[in-house]
Amino acid sequence: MFKITVSCVTFRKLIMISSEETSAIRVLIVDDETLVRGVLRSILAEHQDVEVVGEAATGDEAVSSIERLQPNVVTLDIRMPRMDGVAAAYEIRSRYPHVKLIGLTELTQGHDYHAMHRAGVVGIYQKSKAAEELYTAIKRAIAGQDS
């Protein structure tokens, strides 16, 4: 006969490790176009390890909702009214340095593209390629890998 002894402390640690491994990546989608937000949400809904916790139409809406929504990753459109993606990226990085930022744009280069990198985004991707690249970009961001 065998006797198995597991302490409460060990059992709690196992539960904590298990829940950390299965917890979803929390994503906030920020884009001024409702249709784009919906498409991005649909793309991410295909992945069980990703949870879209909210949407914002402007940079200032994104900044104000991060504390409440607690995302791990924020996808940011570069060009938005009131507070664009560059300004939002700077603000988010200063207040919430643990949040990973991913830029989304229709452009592939230019002033805004470079400004987003300086603001602390870990990668910038074209919206037209979001279906192929967004999930991988999020996983790379969480793993601490730049694009």
Image (tube, grey):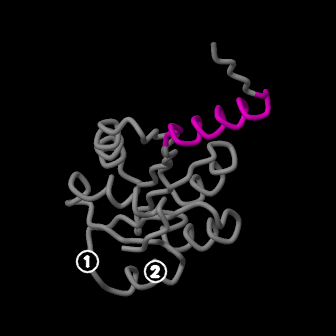
The residue carrying pointer 1 sits among few (fewer than 14), some (14 to 19) or many (20 or more) residues within 10 Å by Cα, namely few
Say which amino acid is labelled 2: His
The residue at the point 73 percent across, 32 percent down is 12
Say whether residue 28 is magenta: no
* Image quarter hosting the N terminus: top right
Q: Secondary structure at mark 2?
A: helix
Q: Earlier in the sequence, mark 1 or mark 2?
A: 1
CB under 8 Å between callouts 1 and 2?
Answer: no
Q: Magenta stretch: give its range.
A: 7-24
Q: Which residue is mark 2?
A: 117
Q: Which residue is mark 1?
A: 108
Quick check: 53 above or below 147? above
Quick check: 115 above or below 20? below
The residue at the point 54 percent across, 64 percent down is 82
Q: Nearer the viewer, residue 79 or 12?
A: 12
Left or right of 32 in this view: 20: right
The residue at the point 49 percent across, 46 percent down is 25
Q: Nearer the viewer, residue 146 or 87?
A: 146
Q: Where in the figure is residue 2, as x and y percent of width and height? A: 64, 17
The residue at the point 40 percent across, 56 percent down is 139
